[in-house]
Amino acid sequence: MENPKNATKQQFDSGDFPSVDFDTCISRLINVCQLNWLDNARKNLKSFRDIRNRIEHFGISDSIEAITSLAAKSLSVVLDFIASDINQDLVSEHEEDIDERFAEFDFSPFLAHI
C-alpha cells in the first residue's frame, strides 16, 4: 500500500488501492523489517524490475540469456527471503505446491515475443 496509514481492510480485500513503488518497498523491507541483507540484493531486483518495464512498454530488446540470468538472480533473492524471513511453518505447509509450480514454470509464452 502506498500509504499504510490510509489503508482499510475493505481496500485490501478488494485490491482497490495504489500499490507501493519499488524503491519505497525495498526501503521499508530494509528499514522497517530490518532485512539488511536485502540492501545487497537491491541491484539484482532493480535490474529485473527495469527489464520487466522495458518488456512491458517496448517489447523485448535484450537477449534471452540476459533476461534468464536476471530472472535467476531475482528468484534467488526471493528464495533467500523465503528461507530466512518467512514463517517456515507456512512454507512447509505449501512446499509441495511451490515445488510443483516451479517445476511447471513455462518460459514459452515469454519466449514467443523474441
Image (cartoon, rainbow, N blue to C red):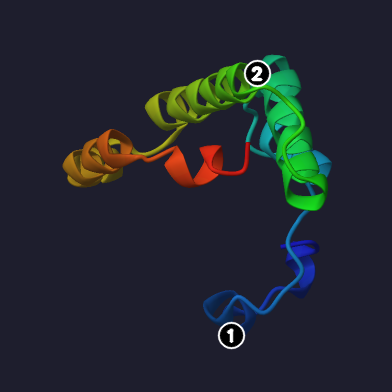
Q: Amino acid at mark 1?
A: Gln
Quarter of the image where the C terminus is located: top right
Residue at point 79% right, 61% down?
Answer: 2
Q: Are marks 2 and 1 in contact (CB under 8 Å)?
A: no
In the picture, measured across the screen, residue 60 lies left or right of residue 95, that is right
**Position in image of residue 45 (x %, y %):** 68, 28
State the SS at label 2: helix
Label number found at residue 22: none
Q: Amino acid at mark 2?
A: Ala
Q: Pick whichever of labels 2 and 1 is earlier in the sequence.
A: 1
The residue that mark 1 highlights is: 10
Q: Quadrant of residue 69?
A: top right
Q: CA distance from mark 2 to mark 1?
A: 41 Å
**Position in image of residue 1 (x %, y %):** 71, 63
Q: Quadrant of residue 49?
A: top right
**Position in image of residue 32 (x %, y %):** 70, 39
Mark in the foreground, 2 or 1? 2
Instruction: Give the camera-side residue of 89 and 98.
Output: 98
Residue at point 65% right, 18% down?
Answer: 66
State the SS at label 1: helix
The residue that mark 2 highlights is: 66
In the displayed structure, 42 sits above or below 4; it is: above
Residue at point 69% right, 21% down?
Answer: 44
In the picture, measured across the screen, residue 59 lies left or right of residue 105, that is right
The crowding category of the residue bearing disc 1, from other C-alpha atoms within 10 Å (few below 14, some 14 to 19, many at least 20), is: few
